[in-house]
Amino acid sequence: MDYIMTTLDNLIHQTAFFNLEVGNYIMIVVACVFLYLAIAKEYEPLLLVPIAFGMLLVNIYPDIMAEGGLLHYFYLLDEWAILPSLIFMGVGAMTDFGPLIANPKSFLLGASAQFGIFAAYFGAIALGFNDMAAAAISIIGGADGPTSIFLASKLGQTALLGPIAVAAYSYMSLVPIIQPPIMRLLTTEEERKIKMGQLRPVSKLEKILFPVIVTIVVSLILPTTAPLVGMLMLGNLFRESGVVRQLTDTASNALMYIVVILLGTSVGATTSAEAFLNWSTIKIVVLGLVAFAFGTAAGVVFGKIMCKMTGGKINPLIGSAGVSAVPMAARVSQKVGAESDPTNFLLMHAMGPNVAGVIGTAVAAGTFMAIFGVF
C-alpha cells in the first residue's frame, strides 16, 4: 500500500500543476490570445501560430528550452543567425523587385521609414538600456522580425532576444490595425485619391543584374550585411534567372515554411514567464510600438514631400509601406487608398518602398554592427 501511495504521490507531483507559478499561467493565457488572433482573426497565422505554440510549450514544460531540450536546438539556429538569413533567402525568392527597379525613388521612401529605428534607439537609451541593447531593440521599428533576431544575436543580446522577436513579429502581424489610423491622420482625402502612373516595364536583364549589383555595392560598404542582404539577393536571383526553378520553388516554399516553423516555435519558447514578465519587456514592447508608429509616419510624411515635389504624381500612402513587413504593408497602402477611391490601385507602387524597406532595415542593422565593431 505504501508503494502505491508513494507512486501516486510521485506521479501527481510530476504534473505541471505543482511546478508552475502564476506568471506561467499568465503567459499561457497570452499564448491562447495569440492563437485566437492567428486562427480566428487570421493575423499573420504563419507567424503567430508557431510563436504562440512555442510560448505555450515553454510555460507548461520549461525544460523544453533547457540544454538537451528539443527547442533549445532550434533556438541555437537563431543565436547563430542561420534561420534569419534563410528567411531572407525565401523572401527574396518570393518577391518581385521590379517595382523598385522601375521607380528608384522608392529607395528614398524606404529609407525614410527607417526613422522609426533610430527613434527607438534613442528612446531605449533614454529608458536606461545600454548602447548594444538599444540597437538590438531599435530594429523593431522596421517591423522586421528576422533582422531583429539577427542583430540581437550578433550584438550578444540573447537575454532580450525573446521579447524583441515577439514584439517585432507581433507588430508585423498587426500592421493592418496600427498603420491605417496613422495614414489617414497624416493625409487628406485628395491625397489618398491620387492615382499614380503605370510603372515602366522592367527587362529581364535589369532584374538579373539588380541582385548582383546590390549585393556587391552594399556588401562592399557594409560587409556585415552580407548574411542578410546576400541571402535576400540570392533568393531573388534564383527567381529572376529562370534557370533554377527547383531552387526557387524550394527556397520560396518548402524551405521557407520549415524555417518559419523552427524560428517561430523557438522564438515563442524564449518567452518563459521568468524571462518575459518584467519591466524590460514592457519597455521593449512600448518602444516597439512607438518606433513602428514613427516609421510609418515618417514614410507618409516623406511621401507627402515627394508628392509636392513631383506635382502630385506620388500618392503619400505608399510611403507607409517603407517598413519592411513584406507584403503586408504594401497591401495596407492599397486598402487605405481603395477606401477613398475603389478604382485606385497602389499595390505595385507600394511594393517599391516595401522592398526598399527590407534592404534599408538590413543596412541599418549592418550600420549598428559596424559602429560596435561586431562582425
Image (spheres, rainbow, N blue to C red):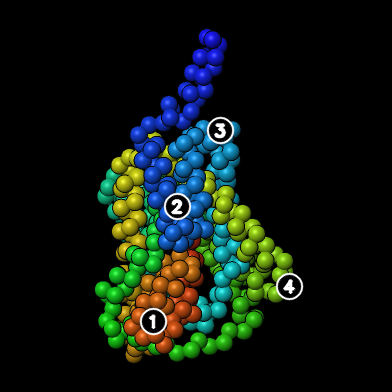
Q: Kindly identify the residue that appears in the image at 56 percent across and 61 percent down.
A: 88
Side of 87 relative to 181 (left or right): right
User: Which element is circle 4 on?
Assistant: loop
Question: x%, y% of residue 164?
Answer: 41, 49
- Dividing the picture into quarters, in which one does residue 122 lie? bottom left
Q: Kindly identify the residue that appears in the image at 34 percent across and 90 percent down.
A: 311
Q: Which residue is mark 3?
A: 67
Among the two numbered marks 2 and 1 on one chain, the one whose residue lies closer to the N terminus? 2
Question: Rounded to the nearest whole Å, what is the CA distance between mark 1 and mark 3?
Answer: 51 Å
- Dividing the picture into quarters, in which one does residue 342 lie? bottom left
**Residue most extreme to the front:** 1
Q: Which residue is mark 4?
A: 243
| Amino acid type of the residue tagged 2 in the rendering | Leu
Q: Nearer the viewer, residue 140 or 124?
A: 140
User: Which element is circle 1 on?
Assistant: helix
Among the two numbered marks 2 and 3 on one chain, the one whose residue lies closer to the N terminus? 2
Q: Which residue is mark 2?
A: 35
Q: In front of the other: label 3 or label 4?
A: 3
| Amino acid type of the residue tagged 1 in the rendering | Ala
Question: Rounded to the nearest whole Å, what is the CA distance between mark 2 and mark 3?
Answer: 27 Å
| Amino acid type of the residue tagged 3 in the rendering | Glu
Q: Is residue 368 visible?
A: no
Numbered disc total:
4
Q: Which mark is residue 338?
A: 1
Among the two numbered marks 2 and 4 on one chain, the one whose residue lies closer to the N terminus? 2
